[in-house]
Amino acid sequence: MHPDLDTATIHDIATALRRARHVAVLTGAGVSAESGVPTFRDAQTGLWAKFRPEDLATPEAFARNPPMVWQWYAERREAVARVAPNPGHHALAKLQVRFETFTLITQNVDGLHAKAGNRNVIELHGNILKTKCFECNAPQSPAADHAIQPPPCSCGKSVCRPDVVWFGEALPAKAIDAAQRAARSCDVFFSIGTSTQVYPAAELPFTAKQRGALVVEINPDATPFTPHADHVIRAPSGVALPRLIAALEG
Ligand code: OAD
Ligand code: ZN
C-alpha cells in the first residue's frame, strides 16, 4: 500500500462520492506520466526542461519555422501513439458510469482518456492527434507521410498545424464554457496531476471550491491549490484512483 494513501481519506471521499450526483474531474499531464508521457514542468522529465515553450508552442514559433514545430509535434504524436492508458485512466473510465453526471475535463492533448473508454472528454488544450489549417482552422487529415514539412491545407492559403492550443491562444470557447459550468455545478471536483499553474484551466478547482463542491487534489507534489483542497492524496494517480474505485466498490 502506498505510504501516502491514507485509508480514512479514501473512505471519506468514497462516502462523499456515494452521495454525489455530479462529479467533475480536471486532469493534467501527471495523469499520463505513468503511461510514459513526459509532463511539462517536472524537472526530470518535463518537456519544457529541454525546450522553451515560446520556441515551439506558439503561433509565432510556427510562423518562424513551420518544419521545426511540425516535426516536434510529429515526434510527440508518434510517442503518444505508442503509449497505453494506465490504471489511473482506466479508473476514471470506471468512474464515468457511476454518476448521473460525470464531466471529465483534461488539459492533456494525448487522447489517452478516450483510449481508456471515457466519452465526451472536454479537451481544453486540443488533441495532438488532430490537425487543422493554420489559416482557416478547418480540420485536416493529412497523409501520415508528412513527417518533415507541414502539408498544405485544402484551402490553398496555408499549411496544416497541430490542433492544440498554443501559448497566447484562446481555448476552444465551447470547451472552456462547458468546463466552467461543470465546476460551478458539481458536487465533487477532482484536480488530478496538474501543477495548477496554467489559466484558465487552473481556475476550475478554485471555482468548484467557491461554489461549494468538495474538492480533492491527487498529486505527489503540492500545488498552489493544495491549501484550498478539502482532501489531498499525495500519491500517483495510477495508484490513488484504483484504490478509490476499490473503496467505492467495497
Ligand atoms: P505540469 O507538467 O505543469 O504538471 C504536472 C503535475 O503532475 C505536477 O504537479 C506533478 O507533481 C504531477 N504528477 C507527476 N507525476 C504524477 C502522477 N503519477 N500522478 C499524479 N500527478 C503527477 O503539467 P500540467 O499541469 O498538465 O498547456 O500543465 C498544464 C499545461 O501547461 C499543459 O496543458 C500545457 C502546458 O503548457 C498547453 O500546452 C497549452
Ligand atoms: Zn485552410
Image (cartoon, grey):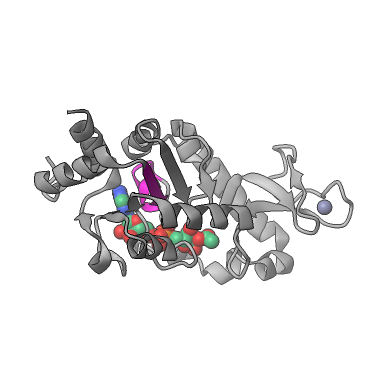
Q: Position of residue 16 (x, y in %)?
A: 23, 44
What residue is at 89 percent from the left and 52 percent from the top?
Answer: 156
**On the rendered image, what quadrant is the N terminus found in?**
top left
Q: Position of residue 77 (x, y in %)?
A: 57, 44
What residue is at 59 percent from the left and 60 percent from the top?
Answer: 171
- Residue sitting nearer the eye, 121 or 66: 121
Is residue 172 visible in this depiction of the protein?
no
What residue is at 38 percent from the left and 64 percent from the top?
Answer: 196
Image quadrant assignment for residue 229 = bottom left
**Relative to residue 11, is residue 43 drawn left or right?**
right
What residue is at 74 percent from the left and 45 percent from the top?
Answer: 139
Q: Position of residue 102 (x, y in %)?
A: 42, 40
The answer to whether residue 117 is magenta is no
Image quadrant assignment for residue 177 = bottom right
Question: What residue range appears in magenta?
Answer: 22-36
**Relative to residue 29, is residue 155 drawn left or right?**
right
Q: Is residue 33 above or below residue 93?
A: below
**On the rendered image, what quadrant is the C terminus found in?**
top left
Q: Is residue 63 above or below residue 150?
A: below
Q: Position of residue 42 (x, y in %)?
A: 35, 61
Task: Tell how many labels.
Answer: 0
**Relative to residue 106, is residue 242 drawn left or right?**
left
- Residue sitting nearer the eye, 178 or 61: 178
- Given the current orientation, which residue lies at the most extreme top position? 250
Q: Is residue 41 above or below residue 160?
A: below
The answer to whether residue 31 is magenta is yes
